[in-house]
Amino acid sequence: MSFSLSEQTEAKIDQVMQRYPEKRAATLPILHLIQEEKGWISDEAQNYVAQRVEVPPIKIREVLSFYTLLHTRKIGKFHFQVCRTVACTLRGGKSILQHLEKKLGIKSGETSADGMFTLTEVECLAACEIAPMLQLNDDYIGPLTPEKLDELIDGLK
Ligand code: FES
């Protein structure tokens, strides 16, 4: 499958490349630009970046495995990232996740068939003071209860 980007993104990537004498140093900024346009980093996108920065594709996959903010699968319009680390778990994080799974009709790691919702478990988001919490797109929300979740989801529909 061929991979292409908008002219604007290509131009931004060219600019980024000029900023780094060593091409591979441009890897992360390029990945962010692609995610900004496409919403995620497909295999084709990974190969494209590998070519641009002149490294084997496996190096790009290694980078992606470190950065949970970069997605290697399609993400729904609303991305729920539920914290599963200690502070949130002790305050009911597991039941928050189960409630979301039931309400959205998807399991952790899945995206709904209509492309609206993605549910992911993540490690501590450094917002333990509002545990149990989740990140919905760019917003941190907590402390959560099943009732608050219902309100939140109903407000999105
Ligand atoms: S443990 Fe959930 S935000 Fe820190």
Image (cartoon, grey):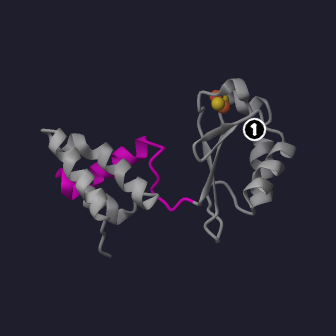
The C terminus - image quarter? bottom right
Instruction: Find out whether residue 69 is within the magenta segment.
Output: yes
Q: Is residue 55 visible?
A: no
Around disc 1, counting alpha carbons within 10 Å, would you say few (fewer than 14), some (14 to 19), or many (20 or more)? Answer: many
Q: Position of residue 126 (x, y in %)?
A: 59, 27
- Tally the numbered discs: 1
Q: Residue 87: where, in percent of width, then height?
A: 70, 27
Query: Which residue is at a point 40% across and 58% down the rendered structure image?
Result: 37
Q: Nearer the viewer, residue 42 or 142?
A: 142
Q: Residue 63: percent from the left, percent from the top?
A: 35, 44
- Note whether 131 is above or below 154 in the view shown: above
Q: Which residues are magenta?
A: 50-75
| Residue with the most extreme left position | 21
The residue pinned by badge 1 equals 93
Please state which of residues 24 and 66 is positioned toward the viewer in this rendering: 24
Q: Is residue 128 visible?
A: yes
Side of 131 where 6 appears, left or right: left
**On the picture, is 63 further left or further right than 96?**
left
Mark 1 residue's CB less than 8 Å from ligand 1: yes
Identified at 72% across, 28% down, the residue is 130
* Of 123 and 3, the residue lying toward us: 3
The amino acid beneath tag 1 is Gly
- Horizontal side of 27 relative to 129 (left or right) equals left
- Disc 1 is placed on an element classified as helix
